[in-house]
Amino acid sequence: MPSPVAKNTSPRNIWGLHPNVFFLGLVSLLTDVSSEMIFTLVPLFVKNVLGGGGIIVGLIGGLSESFDAVFRIFSGRISDRFQKRKLLAVIGYGFSTIIKPFMLLATAWGGVLGVRFGDRIGKGIRSSPRNALIADSVDAKVRGKSFGFHRAMDTSGAVLGLSIAAVIIYAFQGTDLTLMDNTYRWLVIVGIIPAVLAVIMLIAFVREKVHPAGAVAPITAGAAPAASNQKFSGQFKLFLLIMGVFTLGNSSDFFIVLRAQNLEVNVLEITVMLVVFNITYALIATPAGIISDKLGRRKVIIVGWTVYALVYLGFALATSVWSIWVLFAAYGIYYGIVEGVAKAYVADLVPAERRGTAYGYYQGVVGLMLLPASVLAGVLWDTVNTAAPFYFGAGLAFLAMLGLLFFLKEKRLSPQ
């Protein structure tokens, strides 16, 4: 008896993208609208309203990011074991949404740390499975484009969120130099709405990626497929080491916000600068991903880290408001070049069966290094001068760029 002909169940692309990539991009857009409104101005809230210093700001930024990293590692491994990427993404996005309203109750820096910590736990739970779901859903030859689109949508959400924040700031305090308590509370109230919409969209439109029978089996006790026991390559481990060096100098972006206010830029202008930063980021991300598909990820990351080193050196030397405008825009170029491409590079270096775990390790290294990086930046800020954290970051970025240039090979792409 002849075998039945398999039906083509491939989903129809949207704008040339797999539906999962498209809708996960929209989910990230809405989530970033919320997060940028609520958390981007946290350093000003801590400093201007709660009276905290550089070390406190660094502790909040670094500690929350580091615990986020721990959850990324475990969520990635769990998503590989059970092949339930979407479920973990829903839990992560949902947890962050539930915790955000508690920011309205924060009256001391410890409360801010607790809410920020909870939000990053949610991000830690969702990030690795979501990235693995994107990688699972597309062919290797359009992986850079897909991650670039996701980053562009995420960053477009930041542009929208910060634009709304700028309107609220102008309405409640005009062009005052410091952030006021009531202004920040309204940012939180409005920012909660898109977070709820993001969770609804994720549940309704994103689908779990079902692999062909036998292609990638869930890892179960006593019956693990041979691929699940594969060791990660030396190139992947070396990439993690180099990322660790880079991240030690890449402290929380909270310090860039503080640096702008240090040069007497008012809150409204800082918010608009962040809009410019995110517009640049969004415009660069997808083209950078496409270029990495054609020329190689490593080359593109090297260019991005070189831009980062020059921008951080610029923040250290800046003495005028106009130069801060230029630096915020240039900082967006770095993010647009590197963020999506680095994630695509991780997928290139590891087997499909272990992508969730690999993203957990990658984001774990980045997150865990942010605690010492941010605390060290806070110490340099308070005890040396406000330029010192940026000199330090530029130096380590240059070293990491040399490591990538001389010790890692370009990964030749093959279809998934």
Image (cartoon, rainbow, N blue to C red):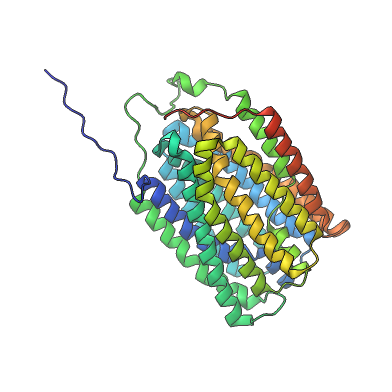
Residue 165 at x, y percent in the picture? 56, 71
Query: Who's the residue at 64% across and 49% down the image?
Result: 65
Residue 388 at x, y percent in the picture? 83, 54
Picture layout, residue 259 above or below residue 131: below
Residue 246 at x, y percent in the picture? 71, 42
Residue 60 shows in the view:
yes
- Left or right: where does residue 267 sit relative to residue 207? right
What is the quadrant of residue 2 in the picture? top left
Name of the residue lying farthest toward the left: 1
Viewer-nearest residue: 182 or 242:
242
Name of the residue lying farthest toward the right: 384
Picture layout, residue 115 above or below residue 267: above
Residue 77 shows in the view:
no
What is the quadrant of residue 58 in the picture? bottom right
Instruction: State the count of labels.
Output: 0
- Left or right: where does residue 63 sit relative to residue 19? right
Viewer-nearest residue: 232 or 125:
232
Query: Who's the residue at 64% across and 82% down the image?
Result: 174
What is the quadrant of residue 345 in the picture? top right
Query: Who's the residue at 68% across and 65% down the image?
Result: 325
Say which quadrant the C terminus sits in: top left
Picture layout, residue 260 above or below residue 2: below
- Left or right: where does residue 254 sit relative to residue 359? right
Viewer-nearest residue: 298 or 375:
298
Say which quadrant the N terminus sits in: top left
